[in-house]
Image: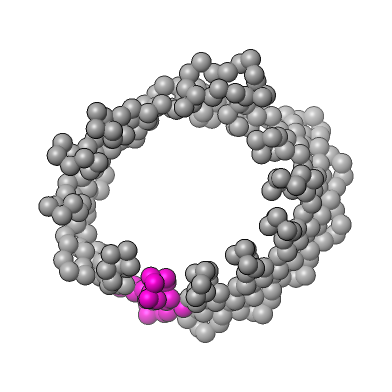
Amino acid sequence: VWLTHDPEYPENLPAAPLVRYGWTPRGELAAVYDRSNTQVRSFTYDDKYRGRMVAHRHTGRPEIRYRYDSDGRVTEQLNPAGLSYTYQYEKDRITITDSMDRREVLHTQGEGGLKRVVKKEHADGSVTQSQFDAVGRLKAQTDAAGRTTEYSPDVVTGLITRITTPDGRASAFYYNHHNQLTSATGPDGLEIRREYDESGRLIQETAHNGDITRYRYDNPHSDLPCATEDATGSRKTMTWSRYGQLLTVTDCSGYVTRYDHDRFGQVTAVHREEGLSQYRAYDSRGQLIA
């Protein structure tokens, strides 16, 4: 992937690609290289089954290997420098054992894409349980102490409309037709509210205590606010680059904080009103070094 056009640095395009990929003759992803041309990921595949990954590695870390059964299910995950795992499959039951002989058992219900873990036997002997509706959405969870939290998803959207804790206290959530949260009421009866403009951008937020924060936008095509105003009337303004990077913040006293970025979007300097500046340096891989 090459950077071919940069309005900020039109005459200084990088000579190397931003990221490079290596592939096997069968079209499987074999390697990923970062912008410094350092290999950061590698993948190995089964000779017989195309696309079946049998090993992968992050640069500087040990290679993780996998073994499969005749049905294509992982039976072993081998980590030479850490915990390895074995997986045993039975009907509606999966047993996971690590290399320290600790065992967890997952009990499942449903078929195909609706199969869900309904009970988990943990290595310490505790048991947690989950309940789901007919389309696989979480309805309730019971912890190891037997305490159940209930969830009420909207029939159409699946968004959570109510959460009831083990002590019977409930929180309610309300949404607009764009599935954006418009209000939420906690067990104490206190409410938060949010309002949006026609473009779906947040324009006002009311806290539990009634304090109101307002958001202003000067670009009809941007989701980034140019100003915020809190309950005291204090106003803060922001400017952004065309890439959505924060450039300046001006507080209610008129003090300006400026941010510099490199071509990769990383902050290279923060300049404060009192004349103090903080600088950051990165290596060719984008890692912070100073």
Q: Residue furthest bottom?
A: 168
Horizontal arrangement in the rendering, residue 178 relative to residue 114 (left or right): right
Q: Residue at x 65, y 68 (%)?
A: 176
| Up/down of 164 relative to 202, above or below | below
Quarter holding the C terminus?
top right
Q: Colour scheme in the image?
A: one colour
Location of residue 125 in the rendering, given as x and y in whole percent from the top left corner: 26, 70
Does residue 99 appear anywhere in the picture? Answer: no
Residue 137 in the image: x percent, y percent? Answer: 42, 70
- Residue 118, by quadrant, is bottom left
Q: Is residue 28 above or below residue 74?
A: above
- Along the line of sight, which residue is nearer the eye, 44 or 212? 44
Q: Is residue 156 magenta?
A: no
Extent of the magenta region: 126-150
Q: Nearer the viewer, residue 80 or 158?
A: 158
For the point 60% across and 23% down, which residue is it?
5
Q: Could you tell me which residue is drawn at 14 percent across and 39 percent down?
A: 48
Residue 124 falls in image quadrant: bottom left
Direction from residue 231 to residue 89 in the image, left or right: left
Indicate whether 49 appears above or below 229.
above
Question: Residue shown at 72%/29% (left/top)?
Answer: 277
Q: Position of residue 143 (x, y in %)?
A: 38, 74
Please identify the quarter of the rendering in which residue 34 is found. top left
Residue 131 drawn in magenta: yes
Q: Position of residue 257 (x, y in %)?
A: 77, 36
Between residue 209 and residue 48, name the one nearer to us: 48
**Residue 214 shows in the view:** yes
